[in-house]
Image: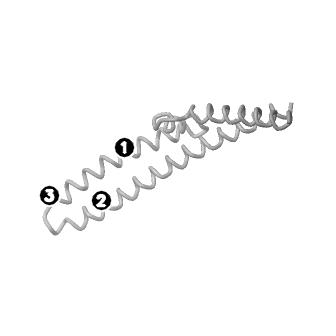
Amino acid sequence: MTTDHDIKIHLAKQAAELDKLMREEQGLEKVLASGFKGGLGGIMIIAYILATALAVAIFYCGYHFFTVAPEQQLFWGVSLLLVFQAQVATKLWIWMETNRSSTLRELKRLELAVAQLTK
């Protein structure tokens, strides 16, 4: 009877610890900021600058697409699509790096928890 009770208490403590860990990284700004904490923080800054520059280029190409003569619309339309694809690729990389960084931190937390259990 006491073994079952001890197991329930131990599982409840673990669940409380997991809930505390899960509450730590809530919110979009904390998730996005976590990408800068990894080893590729400098490249993340460059990626955000590139994404911003590509957003400006999207508006620039879109404006010209709608305001130029019909003979030039093909050029600006293709340019718009290429810039849009480049921005999608940049943002995908940013999210993938952010998720990788978050996963590595969670694995390190798990390693620490396992190390504490083995002591």
Answer whether labels 1 and 2 touch (C-beta < 8 Å): no
Q: Earlier in the sequence, mark 1 or mark 2?
A: 1
In front of the other: 85 or 117: 117
Q: Which residue is mark 3?
A: 67
Q: Is residue 78 above or below residue 84?
A: below
Q: Vertical placement of 97 versus 113: above or below?
A: below
Q: Amino acid at mark 1?
A: Thr
Q: Earlier in the sequence, mark 1 or mark 3?
A: 1
What's the distance in space between the residues labelled 1 and 2, CA to CA? 15 Å
Instruction: First in sequence, mark 3 or 2: give its number.
Output: 3
Report the amino acid beneath label 2.
Leu
The structure residue drawn at horizontal position 20% and vertical position 53%, both measured from the top left corner, is 63
Q: Report the residue marked by disc 1.
A: 52
Secondary structure category for the residue under label 2: helix
Q: Quadrant of residue 64?
A: bottom left
Q: Locate residue 65, reporting x and y percent.
A: 20, 60
Q: What residue does disc 2 label?
A: 80
Q: Please give the name of the residue rendered at 23% of the width and 56% of the height, measured from the top-left corner.
A: 62
Give the camera-side residue of 7 and 67: 7
